[in-house]
Amino acid sequence: MPAVVTITISKYLPMLKNPFSQPEKGTKGVFMMPKEKKQIAIGGGSGFIIDSSGTILTNRHVIEDPKAKYVIVLEEKEYDVNILAKDPINDVAVLKIDGKNLPTLKMGDSSKLELGETVIAIGNALGTFQNTVSRGVVSGLSREITASGNLDGRIQRLRGLIQTDAAINPGNSGGPLVNAAGEVIGINAAMIFGAENVGFAIPINTAKKDLEDIKKYGRIRCPFLGVRYLLLNREIKEKYNLSNSEGALIISETAPDGQAIIPGSPAEKVGLKAGDTIIRIEDEIVCPKNPVEDILQRLKIGQVISLNIIRDKKEIRLKVEVGER
């Protein structure tokens, strides 16, 4: 518990005048917007220290707002925070505070988790109750959900999650999910509103990979192809008169800028274009349970891979070098 931190989030916001005050001279309305702004707390989250010099793991969605101010609270002492990296695919962020001989948590191995195993969630529940502890079990593995952030409401698809019935509430996000040995095996990330004790955590092995990238390259590296797509189902197959029922249709429909192929990307270099359907990557079938981004996460940047596509109802096999996002 001493290694679990609270992350406070605040912003400078304009203050509304007292609606029951008298209107200022020369004005008709009662509500006035003064020029001055005040720093107001708008949320909070959790995190945990993984080395004694102050490296902290949390969720990316906790520190997503670039206009907000973030402060780490540890044992009633406040620290300014430096955001080292945000994982653009997974809901993981790495922070740093200046400290010495800080308490730390040991990271376990999330690949060894078993259904029914006892786990404990620790965090800043509801942004108010620090060091809240709840116990449960691993209810499921490799779960997939679509979630929205507390502040921006942006939708994100998360995969490979640990499901637990340990109570996870707003404010718990970014806190550790630990096993019976006290090792972190997940980062608490989401819960289902309206359900009882259905929470999700990012496997700690995902964060380990991010930490290795930062140590080796100074940043989190993500494999990149450079296409926007829709995964095929019966409705999409019929709508676009396609011959195949599985794969990823390259299409600009999902892009606000109308670009199906990212300029300068590996996809552009090998001649992929809107209307192509990717059916296999390295002979792995592309489908809803195995989408393009999941396959790419298992590949290495710079690796030359095979890509099977359907173009004009003919199958073509291409070679493409995996890029870096």
Image (cartoon, rainbow, N blue to C red):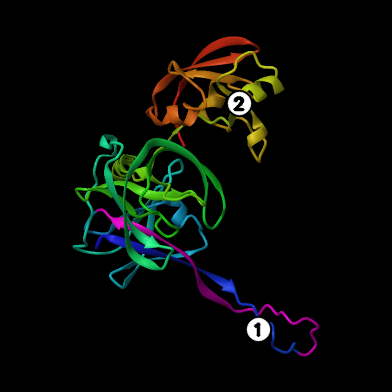
- Viewer-closest of 264 and 259: 259
Q: Residue at x 34, y 45 (%)?
A: 218
Q: Indicate the position of residue 321 as horizontal and vertical percent values.
A: 44, 23
Q: Earlier in the sequence, mark 2 or mark 1?
A: 1
- Describe the element under mark 2 as helix, strand or loop: strand
| Image position, residue 302 (x, y; %) | 39, 27
Nearer to us of marks 2 and 1 is 1
x 24%, y 43%: residue: 108
**Residue 250 — which label?**
2
Q: Amino acid at mark 1?
A: Asn
Whether residue 89 is visible here, answered yes or no, is: yes
In which quadrant of the rendered image does the N terminus lie?
Answer: bottom left
Say which amino acid is labelled 2.
Answer: Ile
Instruction: Tell me where the magenta segment starts and ends, as one range.
Output: 25-50
Q: Secondary structure at mark 1?
A: loop
Residue for badge 1 = 18
Q: Position of residue 320 (x, y in %)?
A: 47, 21
Give the residue at x 49% y 40%.
145
Badge number at residue 141 = none
Mark-to-mark CA distance, 2 and 1: 54 Å
Residue 56 is left or right of residue 153, and the answer is left
- Which is nearer the eye, 285 or 217? 285
